[in-house]
């Protein structure tokens, strides 16, 4: 039987609502873009856990060095290479200061002494030095974000929007800078600047913004021919207004994501340079210098190496998870999914 010849019966269809039922229109509250972003970010458990761990590490970096009487450079003779000992937990056999069956804190002098992360080969408190070193790494990370936003973003915006000879000249200049290895830049800066945070930040200022510049330029090339930009240009808007009022807000999500991904790279750069001896000078501590010191006694006292490595690994992994979550949250295709 064809569709045309079919006879419909009364019970073939039914009303969606009962007869006599009052129908009320449902209004849905509009949500802002940032609220949608936050809602998507919360769904990413890895990014949320990473953000929480980052907040905890930042908190300890701020208050950790003042939680005991030690400083990053205080050395106590007779307290060398002590293993971690925590009050309360030591009673259950964990972190009780025992090393190869020897109670290191059994002497009368050390009976009431507690080193939460142990001590290094010079009798310095590793807990204080780790959080002081984390503070240095976070300062480098903050500097990397500022360099990306202030230099890289502005450079890429101007280059991509202006186009033509201006774009060609700016890109060739960026390629020349990008061709200089960072290690060479830091080494040369060490000849004219004191080694430490200053020389690393200057190295970031010289070459650290190239990645952000390329991302910003690529995003500008995508949106600068959109209708809303052409409409503003037709109404007589200046180039400054077009770049920072029309183009920038529409690529800001990608800028934030790229900045977050630059943080673990900057932390690794500082650790790498400090490991090579080009970072902060002794007795200042950074995670890289602590790893370098612990590496020398890795086989005999592994806790000197393991603790700063764990903090460094947590920082880099959590910042990557956080940046990955931001990338998904700011992606319009991921919103409301």
Image: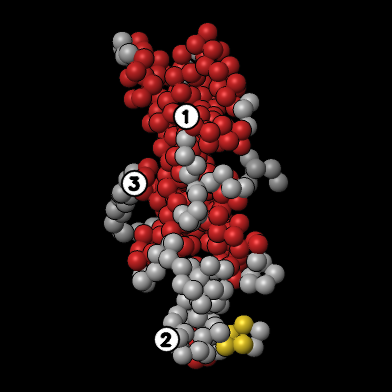
Q: Residue at x 63, y 26 (%)?
A: 179
Q: Is residue 255 in view from this perspective? A: no
Residue 308 in the image: state x and y as whole percent: 55, 62
Residue 92 image offset from top left, x and y in percent: 52, 91
Q: Are marks 2 and 1 in contact (CB under 8 Å)?
A: no
For marks 2 and 3 on the same chain, the one whose residue lies earlier in the sequence: 3
In front of the other: label 2 or label 1? 2
Between marks 2 and 1, how big is the CA–CA gap? 53 Å
Residue visible at 41% across and 60% down?
Answer: 61
Within 10 Å of disc 3 (Cα), the crowding (few <14, some 14-19, many 20+) is: few
Q: Which mark is residue 79?
A: none
Distance Cα–Cα, label 2 vs label 3: 57 Å
Q: Quadrant of residue 158?
A: top left
Q: Which residue is mark 2?
A: 112
Q: Nearer the viewer, mark 1 or mark 3?
A: 1
For mark 2, give the secondary structure: loop
Residue located beneath label 1 in the image: 152
| Placement of 295 over or under 144, stated as above or below | below
Comes first in the chain, label 1 or label 3: 3
Percent position (x, y) of residue 16? 43, 56
First in sequence, mark 2 or 1: give its number. Answer: 2
Q: Is residue 272 left or right of residue 246?
A: right
Residue at the spot of label 3: 31
Q: Position of residue 125 (x, y in %)?
A: 47, 69
Q: Would you say the residues marked 2 and 3 are in contact, meaning their CB atoms lie under 8 Å apart?
A: no
Q: In whole angstroms, how far apart are the C-alphas of marks 1 and 3?
A: 32 Å
Nearest the camera: 238 or 85? 85
Q: Residues within 10 Å of mark 2 (few under 14, many from 20)?
A: few
- Judged from the image, the secondary structure of the residue bearing numbered disc 1 is helix
- Is residue 54 rendered to the left or right of residue 240? right
Q: Would residue 83 appear left or right of 250 to someone viewing this image?
A: right
């Amino acid at each position: 039987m064809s569709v045309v010849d079919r006879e419909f019966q009364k019970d073939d269809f039914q009303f969606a609502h009962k007869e006599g039922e009052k129908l009320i229109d449902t209004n849905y509250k509009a949500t802002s873009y940032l609220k949608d972003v936050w809602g998507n970010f919360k769904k990413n458990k890895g990014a949320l856990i990473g953000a929480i761990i980052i907040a905890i590490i930042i908190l300890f970096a701020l208050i950790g060095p003042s939680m005991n009487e030690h400083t990053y450079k205080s050395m106590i003779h007779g307290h060398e290479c002590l293993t971690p000992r925590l009050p309360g937990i030591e009673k259950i056999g964990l972190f009780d200061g025992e090393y190869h069956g020897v109670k290191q804190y059994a002497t009368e002098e050390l009976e009431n002494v507690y080193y939460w992360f142990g001590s290094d080969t010079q009798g310095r408190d590793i807990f204080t030095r780790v959080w002081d070193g984390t503070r240095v790494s976070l300062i480098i990370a903050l500097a990397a974000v500022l360099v990306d936003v202030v230099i890289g973003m502005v450079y890429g915006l101007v280059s991509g929007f202006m186009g033509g000879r201006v774009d060609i000249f700016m890109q060739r200049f960026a390629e020349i800078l990008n061709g200089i290895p960072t290690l060479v830049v830091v080494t040369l800066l060490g000849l004219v600047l004191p080694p430490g945070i200053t020389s690393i930040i200057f190295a970031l200022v010289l070459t650290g913004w190239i990645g952000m510049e390329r991302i910003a330029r690529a995003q500008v090339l995508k949106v600068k021919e959109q209708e809303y930009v052409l409409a503003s240009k037709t109404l007589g808007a200046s180039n400054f207004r077009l770049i920072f009022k029309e183009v920038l807000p529409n690529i800001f999500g990608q800028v934030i994501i790229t900045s977050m991904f630059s943080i673990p790279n900057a932390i690794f750069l500082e650790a790498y340079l400090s490991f090579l001896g080009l970072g902060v000078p002794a007795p200042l501590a950074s995670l890289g210098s602590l790893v370098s010191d612990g590496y020398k006694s890795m086989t005999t006292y592994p806790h000197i190496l393991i603790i700063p490595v764990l903090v460094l690994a947590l920082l880099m992994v959590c910042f990557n998870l956080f940046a990955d979550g931001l990338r998904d949250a700011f992606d319009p295709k991921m919103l409301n999914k």
